[in-house]
Amino acid sequence: MLYGKTDATCFFLNQIVFSHDSKRKRVVMPYITTIEQLAFVLSSIVEDAKEHNFYTKEVALWVICVGQTFFDKKLPMKHLIRYDQNGWAIFLERESIELKFVFVQPHARRKGWFTNLLKNTPRHKPILVCTKEDAMVRTLIATGFTLHGKSTDNKELRFELHPAQKSCDV
């Protein structure tokens, strides 16, 4: 399978690095060019969310939004998706970079995937994360995020990592 989970190791949407195969052969593409590539990544994300009971409805709604807006270059926002066999993250870039969802596969947890994600995320704008999960709060604090009140709906804590701040290894 061309885009199967065992073959695909990394996708970035809107600024993609696509590498594949067990021989560590790398293929670099500036962005996803086909609907099939986009469909593979988005359907894999939804499958993971369902399998692990991870905000299934919310992730599905974001995936629909990403799918509908991905090819529209006129929109003032940009979705970024980091996807590989160890996890995925959905970002929304506007005046800041908002980390909407981050999922790390069980076999890859506590092995630096999130820290690597931060190191490879564009740092020209603040990164914002809202969460109420204890494990995520600990991870954010350990990687250099600072608490900045609550989310606009007052349901979650709001954390920021500014471009000048360096994230720490966890």
Image: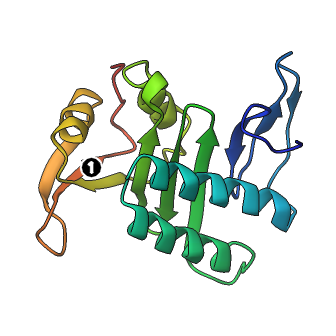
Q: Quadrant of the N terminus?
A: top right
The residue sitting at 83% across, 67% down in the picture is 35
Query: Which element carries disc 1, helix, strand or loop?
Result: strand
Q: Quadrant of the C terminus?
A: top left
Q: Is residue 33 left or right of residue 80?
A: right
Taking depth in this image into account, of 9 and 157 the one nearest to the observer is 9
Taking depth in this image into account, of 24 and 74 the one nearest to the observer is 24
Residue type pointed to by label 1: Glu
Q: Is residue 158 left or right of residue 66?
A: left
Counting from the top left corner in percent of width and height, residue 133 is at: 19, 46
Tell me if residue 38 comes above or below residue 160 in the rendering. below
One can see residue 89 in this view: yes
Farthest residue, direction front: 51
The residue sitting at 57% across, 64% down in the picture is 79
One can see residue 32 in this view: no
Q: Which residue is mark 1?
A: 160
Q: Quadrant location of residue 72?
A: bottom right
Farthest residue, direction bottom: 74
Q: Few, some or many C-alpha atoms within 10 Å of disc 1 (few <14, some 14-19, many ≥20)?
A: many
Colouring chosen for the image of the structure:
rainbow
The residue sitting at 87% across, 63% down in the picture is 34
Q: Is residue 117 left or right of residue 134?
A: right
Counting from the top left corner in percent of width and height, residue 91 is at: 49, 57
Q: Quadrant location of residue 150?
A: bottom left
Counting from the top left corner in percent of width and height, residue 119 is at: 50, 31
Counting from the top left corner in percent of width and height, residue 2 is at: 89, 43
Tell me if residue 21 comes above or below residue 87 in the rendering. above
